[in-house]
Amino acid sequence: MTSVLRFERRGRVALLVLDRPTRLNAIGSDTVAELHQHLDAIEADPQLRSIVVTGEGRAFSAGADISELDTLQNGADFARFVKGLTDAYDRLEACPVPSIAAINGMAFGGGCELALACDLRLAAPGARLGVPEIKLGLLPAAGGSQRLARMLPAGVAKHMLLTGAPLDAATAAQFGLVNSIHDDVVEAALALATSLAEGPPAALAAAKRLVDIGGELSLAEGIALERDTVAALFDTHDRVEGLTAFREKRPPSFSGR
């Protein structure tokens, strides 16, 4: 069976490539199943410490697989389909390993939602991010409306949802939806992922958790969570290694302990 989500190991980086270029890397249930399989392998391998997600060819992903959507009979069928996408994207977002979307071209609909589930987003100059579902009488249903509303000013998020118009890379970067723009976006993402992979795994996972969970807490609760989290990190071997390396003026060698 042909893979639709190719896995490549680049040192300590897991490179996941949406690999259906003749269909602009449309995302279906098969993509979801393979994403779960790869996340199983990544989470079980302590040597894999960061993830890059990109698309083969000229698109990141044009969105959900229309041919699969055409087989759905009713709203209940559609709900099951999008729950599969949502569960996979939520799992990627919650993965302790930091993830980077290398947006090499259009990222529309479910493809945009996949990029939003990553921790960081790098884009090629010609990349575009959009949720055009309104043009089909629908709305994004795999986290798009909610993640956009948390990442963008309300007016910008509503404009994307109500009109279906995408943001180009430069505009997305102005609003912070994209972290940076690169001519060779995959190589830039791999370089950043390699740098992250050299960091302390427990602290990286904790940083993700503090941002993702802390945003749902009051300021006082968030600060308490931060204090408890960093106190736990203080007892790790990597904290000792980091401080020792600083004193010895050498790069640290973090082990994940």
Image (cartoon, grey):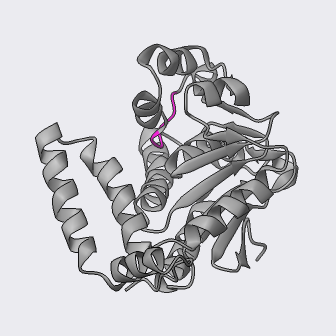
Quadrant location of residue 256?
bottom left
Q: Nearer the viewer, residue 20 or 220?
A: 220
Q: Is residue 14 left or right of residue 3?
A: left
> Measuring 33% from the left and 57% from the top, which residue is drawn there?
209
Q: Is residue 156 above or below residue 252?
A: above
Q: Is residue 98 above or below residue 75?
A: below
Quadrant location of residue 167?
top right
Residue 46 point in image, percent of width and height: 49, 85
Q: Is residue 98 left or right of residue 213?
A: right
Residue 136 point in image, percent of width and height: 62, 24
> Measuring 48% from the left and 17% from the top, which residue is drawn there?
158
Magenta stretch prevailing secondary structure: loop
Give the residue furthest to the front: 248
The image shows a total of numbered marks equal to 0
> Measuring 78% from the left and 46% from the top, which residue is drawn there?
104
Q: Is residue 251 magenta?
A: no
Q: Is residue 121 above or below residue 14?
A: above
Quadrant the C terminus occupies: bottom left
Residue 72 point in image, percent of width and height: 56, 45
Q: Is residue 137 visible?
A: yes
Highlighted magenta segment, given as a residue range: 139-143
Q: Is residue 71 visible?
A: no
